Image (cartoon, helix red, strand yellow):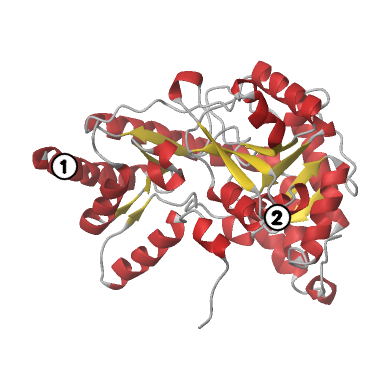
Amino acid sequence: MTKVSGRMARLPAYAVAKIATTKRRLLAEGKDVIDMGAGDADLPPPEVAVRTLAEALKDPKMSRYAFQTGLLEFRQAAARYMERRFGVKLDPIAELLPLLGSKDGLAHLTFAALDAGDACLIPEPGYSPYQGGTVLAGGEPIVYPLRPDNGFLVELGDLPRDQLARIKLVFLNYPNNPTTAVAPRDYLERTVKICRERGIVLAYDNPYCDVTFDGYVAPSIFEIPGAKEVAVEFHSLSKSFCMTGWRIAWVAGNPQMIAALQQVKNFTDTGPFLAIQKAAAATLDQAEKIIPGVVETFRRRRDAAVTALAGIGLQVERPRATMYLWVPLPDGLPSGPFAGQLLDEEYVAVLAGSSFGPGGEGFFRVALTVNEDRFREAAVRIGRVLERARQAV
């Protein structure tokens, strides 16, 4: 009898994959599904991306192996974007690496940064590949609970000294998925300081840096002096440019870790499709024209969603960033059964807070991936499930 490795049992559940399977079945049955589970907006990709890709497909050279070197044009465009957006100068060769989506880099970074048994600090609730990558690399995940009372921040200085001494890698994600929290500059400064003192690799996951509202501007970790000594930062075209399925992103920062991650990826893939890299380069050069329209759409949806949820008795903080709402459930209503009932009975997909780890219990996440009218309809359905849950108590 065949047997899978023991580490498979230690992997966290991946809720989005389960929702996709259920959604496919419900649609086949003719159900009207409102999907606000995955962060996969219904908006079209930028025209410049589509046009450039179509032209690139005619060039036979674009169909060759990309390898990790990739397309210099994409590396340079990403470096230009970083300089325009954050005032950060990067060597596009030594300090930047194309990725097959940021998930690719986040999961594979663990192989570059951890030896077997090394500890990695994982925020909870948090993105599953942080823990999944650590487990697959043979590392030891140390879970840090994110709490509302401290702004959902990972405070390295609050860890016991013996535990902090064991940590080789820490994942941070601000603006945060799923809590929508943002990180003050003084927090980033003290975090970088501890990582430098301890030699901890800081993986700063920053895909929502441009999805910000009400005048808030999200920073890069490299705006903090000395961050490049220890940090790598992940950026993606998935969210700000509505290009989730294109699987194109980059990681920037510490050249030693960039080189190590590149070496890992030499054995796992041959890089993003060159034609997509060319399209992404053209898109990044027009970022300032493209992003405001996308963000305005998310802002309208955010405001409509907050109002609609308030109408059914769910009070939600109006987030300053991301494409999500982190919605508190009534006391005593577990998020997993609630999300399952909502999908099975009312055909509305959201993510249970517990799907991001036990620390997410008591909440559910809504993605702003449908228009205002569809969200208002979803809120009516959510209200029906809540009412049935109240009557069952």
**Residue type at tag 1:** Ala
Among the two numbered marks 2 and 1 on one chain, the one whose residue lies closer to the N terminus = 2
Q: Residue 34 in the image: x percent, y percent?
A: 33, 54
Residue appearing at x 42%, y 48% in the figure: 355
- Mark on residue 389? 1
Query: How far is the residue under mark 2 from the one under mark 1?
Result: 41 Å
Residue appearing at x 36%, y 48% in the figure: 350
Q: Residue 300 in the image: x percent, y percent?
A: 43, 35
- 355 or 382, which lies in front? 355
- 207 or 257, which lies in front? 257
* Quadrant assignment, res 228: top right
Up-down: is 207 above or below 259?
above
Quadrant in which the C terminus appears: top left
Residue appearing at x 58%, y 68% in the figure: 5
Is 222 on the left-hand or right-hand side of 243? right
- 288 or 274, which lies in front? 274
Q: Answer few, some or many: residues within 10 Å of disc 1's Cα (few below 14, many 20 plus, some between 14 and 19).
A: some
For the residues labelled 2 and 1, say whether their Cβ atoms are less than 8 Å apart.
no
Is 312 on the left-hand or right-hand side of 49? left
Is 39 on the left-hand or right-hand side of 54? left
**Residue type at tag 2:** His
Residue at disc 2, secondary structure: helix
Q: Residue 62 in the image: x percent, y percent?
A: 80, 70
Query: Which residue is under mark 2?
Result: 108
Q: Residue 172 in the image: x percent, y percent?
A: 63, 35
